[in-house]
Image (cartoon, rainbow, N blue to C red):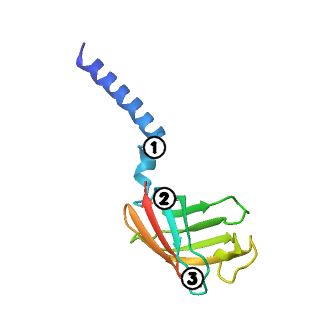
Amino acid sequence: MNTLRIRSRTASCMAILGACAVSLGYGLDAQAAGPFDGAWNVTLNCPTAPDNTLSYTWQFPATVVQGVLHGEHGVKDGGGWLTLDGKIEPDGSSTLMANGLTNAPAYAVGHPQPRTPYTYEVSAHFDAALGSGQRTTTRHCDFVFVKQ
């Protein structure tokens, strides 16, 4: 086989491999991904509050795409539903917004009726594989983020 045919076949194979890599997410899209992009596991832990509001711990998935986090716990519009959203800055700092609906009154400050809307901010910091955050108002709650 001559050198020209070998180079031609090699170029064809490389083009096919390159197209496959791009379609599988290993090409330009992967290069554009930020350092925090990917799937994360979130643990929210709220200890018993000073007014004896009961403690709870939730675990739920979140996804970061182009530096923007979105996580969701529970069933949309149901009691105990929570969304967590916000941008992660290049230095890892983030202010996330939690929006949700209460569940059982004993677990919410002030003991409101189930499915009462609430919102609060979370001050967080991320590195390549871990993150942590704290609720900034009303009740002390901690967040732990672990990249999958």
Q: Say the numbered circle drawn on residue 94.
A: none
Residue under pointer 1: 25
Question: Which of the pair 104/140 is nearer the observer?
Answer: 104
Q: Could you say where residue 31 lies in the image, as x and y percent from the top left? A: 40, 51
Q: Could you say where residue 69 lies in the image, as x and y percent from the top left? A: 53, 63
Location of residue 80 (image quadrant): bottom right
Q: For this view, does 103 lie left or right of residue 48?
A: right
Location of residue 12 (image quadrant): top left
Where 22 sits versus 63, above or below?
Answer: above
Tell me how many marks there are. Answer: 3
Q: For this view, does 145 lie left or right of residue 108?
A: left
Q: Could you say where residue 51 lies in the image, as x and y percent from the top left? A: 61, 86
Closer to us: mark 2 or mark 1?
2
Helix or strand or loop: what does disc 1 sit on? loop
Helix or strand or loop: what does disc 2 sit on? strand
Residue under pointer 3: 49
**Which badge, 1 or 3, comes first in the chain's sequence?**
1
Residue under pointer 2: 41
- State the separation of the CA atoms marked 2 and 3: 25 Å
| Residue displayed at 42% across by 38% down | 21
